[in-house]
Image (cartoon, coloured by chain):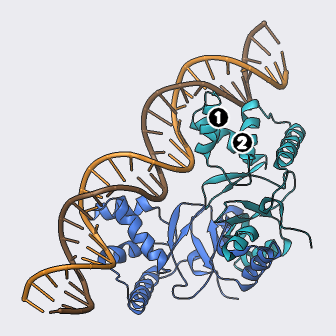
Chain colours: A blue, B cyan, C orange, D brown
Amino acid sequence: MSAHALPYRPHNHQACVTQALADARSICQQQNVRLTPTRERVLELIWQSHKPLGAYDVLAKLTSEGHNAAPPTVYRALDFLQQQGLVHRIASLNAFTGCTHAGEHHTGMFLICRACGNVLELTDASVSTAIQNAANAEAFRAETVTLEVAGLCPGCQAEKAV
Amino acid sequence: MSAHALPYRPHNHQACVTQALADARSICQQQNVRLTPTRERVLELIWQSHKPLGAYDVLAKLTSEGHNAAPPTVYRALDFLQQQGLVHRIASLNAFTGCTHAGEHHTGMFLICRACGNVLELTDASVSTAIQNAANAEAFRAETVTLEVAGLCPGCQAEKAV
DNA sequence: CGTGCAAATGTTATAATATTGCACTTTTTG
DNA sequence: CAAAAAGTGCAATATTATAACATTTGCACG
């Protein structure tokens, strides 16, 4: 098999950003919602790496750029982006990360490296199925799934081994 | 099959509490750690229902009892109880719930009813296996899993149908 | 084209959740 | 008993998130 998943190895990250922004524009146009400059800028900031960013990190970057921003500015933009499926909130970190499956219907599963902080978003049918089955067995109607796995990514396991 | 799981139907909840406290005493003794009065009282408060309680809810109850408590009082007790596997933190709610599998090694899965607020903790081998497999497929070493499913419990589905 | 409504943003304040640091007390241990 | 370790009290503060209301912008419709 080839190398590790993108977040875990060097890559032309600018391409990730460009792609994400292009997807976002296209999705918002399809949905007939407005990707305003603030929203687009927040999305771009979130995409600056594969490490989730806190709302106040985003805020700091905005204000350092001269944008006249307050917390609600950022939270509104993030709420919008979440609704459009362009970013995800990582509950265990109180932070936000760009969605790498924008436009697809999916329940994300997040692999969060506790060493480097990078996050890989996956969709795995057998995981989703198992969760649904477990919920069904209790007659529980599942609506939203939060699945976040913390551990060590391949690269950081290697470092530790040295 | 019999009725729904405990949290979702009327039951003698005092028995839950009593059992939880007895388990806690036994576990702490085995682990040779101290279940001090404050820690025990916090555990008991957490167990007052199957609805997760926020740290500040616990704090309010403590102070209303005349206990001279501040936020660290509660967070320390909760940290201790988590370390001993006696309570779980529900990341998506910023709240805490009593562990119904105390003493067992497990990765919990939580079914959280958005209507009544009750939480059911499950262990499901096929879910755990599927998650491990998905992580392994990315060469990711999984350590801790946060799995929280929001939706409607059986009782609240029925109410809605009326 | 303008006017009026809805969506988005600006602004101030505050709520809710969580941690730090230090002093002091209690428990354990040698 | 003395020293070390664990636990607690307490004040301050950090971090995350929302409420409330004024203002501006985009856009459909007359």
Quarter of the image with the N terminus of chain A in it: bottom right
Labelled pair 2, 1 in contact (Cβ < 8 Å): yes
Query: Does C27 sit above or below residue B57?
Result: above
Identify the subunit bearing mark 1.
B
Q: Is residue A160 above or below residue A40?
A: above
Marks 2 and 1, the one that precedes in the sequence: 2
Asked if one can make out residue B140 in the rendered structure from this viewpoint, the answer is no
x then y, percent, for residue B12: 85, 50
- Which residue is tagged 1? B62
Residue A110: % across, % down:
63, 72
- Same chain under badges 2 and 1? The reply is yes
Left or right: A79 as drawn, with respect to A121:
left
Q: Chain of mark 2?
A: B
Q: Amino acid at mark 1?
A: Leu
Q: Is residue C30 left or right of residue B60?
A: right
| Residue at 58%, 71% in the rendered image | A119
Visible residue check, residue A103? yes
Q: Identify the residue shown where x is 73% and y is 69%.
A: B153
Residue occupying the far right of the picture:
B1
Kind of residue at badge 2: Leu
Q: Residue B157 falls in which quadrant of the image?
A: bottom right
Find disc 2 in the rendering and name its residue. B45
Q: Measure how far apart labels 2 and 1 are at the Cα level.
A: 9 Å
> x%, y% of residue B140?
70, 72
Dot 1: what SS?
Answer: helix
Position of residue B117 measured from the top left corner of the image (x, y, whole percent): 66, 60
In front of the other: A123 or B8? B8
Tell me: residue A101, above or below residue C12: below
Closer-to-camera residue (D9/C28): D9
Local crowd at mark 2 within 10 Å, few (<14), some, or many (≥20)?
some
